[in-house]
Structures are given as C-alpha cells and as structure tokens.
Image: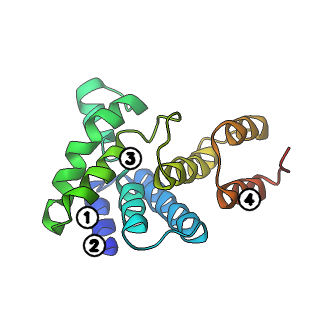
Amino acid sequence: MIQNILNEMIKYDTGDVLRIQHFIKVYSFAHMIGELEGMAGEALQILDIASILHDIGIHQAEKRYGNCMGKYQEELGPDEARKLLAPFNLDDKIIERVCFLISHHHTYDKVDGLDYQILLEADFLVNSFEDSLNNEAVITFRDKVFKTKTGINILNTMFDIAKR
C-alpha cells in the first residue's frame, strides 16, 4: 500500500520535481529512523504515510494565499490528504493520526509521539540540505528539536558536526 500511496502522491505533484524529490527523501529518512528507533506495524505505517503526504497542502496554500508558509500547509493539508487516501480504505484512526501529523509538521512544541518527533527530524534532515543551512543553524535546530538518537546521529554525520 505504501508504494501505491507514493505513486498517487507523485501523480498529485505532477510536474513539480523538487517537491516529489523532497517527500521521497523525507519518507526515506523517516522510515529509516522509525525502524532504527523500534517502530513497526501500524505506528510505522502512520509515519510512512504522514512523511509522504506531509507537504500535500502546498498547492492549495499557493492557490488560496499566494504562498506556501508552514501554517498554511498545516491548515490545508489534512483535507487534501483525506481525498488522496480515500481509495485506500484505511482505518479512520490511521487517517486521523496522519492528518494530525500533517497539520503539525511545522509545529515544534508539544510533540506527542515518536511518529511526530521523527517526522520533524526527517523533514529537517532534507530541508537543511535543500535550504543550504550553515552548520550553526543546523546545530541550533538539532539542539532545540532533535530527540531521537538515530536522527541526531544522521544529522551529525551528514554535516560532520559533533554533539556538543
């Protein structure tokens, strides 16, 4: 099912190579961190789906507000995600958690689960590179937001920075 959701999201973002590349990288990091942090079954499935769909609100944000600020993505993403996921006959509990994660993926406080934490970390691992952040900014974000041992190790290794 995950591969089919990936395929549908690629179709959803037709012609938007950067965004397709972005969510595939976020999914890859999220899945890896999730497995290495002990996630499996439904919990990993929720993380996988949320990481694929986390930016699904961007196109609607650009249409409605003229930009894709994080708060607009969080506002508009869940409805788009529900539409994309409808044919997959997922349990309502799974869809609601995925939509919650989408609606909070730019909110860094009150993280209420490992899936949420890992989504934030995976998205930053990709954004930090795509946005060409300097090491100082990476370290600051790491120290304020990252919590998983795996995420911290990947970030430190990617940027060749030591844990302070």
Residue on which disc 1 sits: 8
Mark-to-mark CA distance, 3 and 1: 19 Å
Numbered disc in front, either 3 or 1: 3
Q: Are marks 1 and 2 in contact (CB under 8 Å)?
A: yes
Residue on which disc 3 sits: 101
Q: Where's residue 11, x and y in %?
A: 26, 61
What amino acid is found at the position of numbered circle 1 in the picture?
Glu
Mark 3 residue element: helix
Mark 1 residue element: helix
Residue on which disc 2 sits: 4
Mark 2 residue element: helix
Mark-to-mark CA distance, 2 and 4: 30 Å
**Crowd around label 2: few <14 · some 14–19 · many ≥20 (10 Å):** few
- Which mark is drawn over residue 153? 4
**3 or 1: tag closer to the N-terminus:** 1
What amino acid is found at the position of numbered circle 2 in the picture?
Asn
Mark-to-mark CA distance, 3 and 4: 23 Å
Numbered disc in front, either 4 or 1: 4
What amino acid is found at the position of numbered circle 4 in the picture?
Asn
- Above or below: residue 129 compared with residue 2: above
**Crowd around label 1: few <14 · some 14–19 · many ≥20 (10 Å):** some
Q: Is residue 128 left or right of residue 116?
A: right
Q: Nearer the viewer, residue 94 or 153?
A: 94
Q: Where's residue 28, x and y in %?
A: 51, 66
**4 or 1: tag closer to the N-terminus:** 1
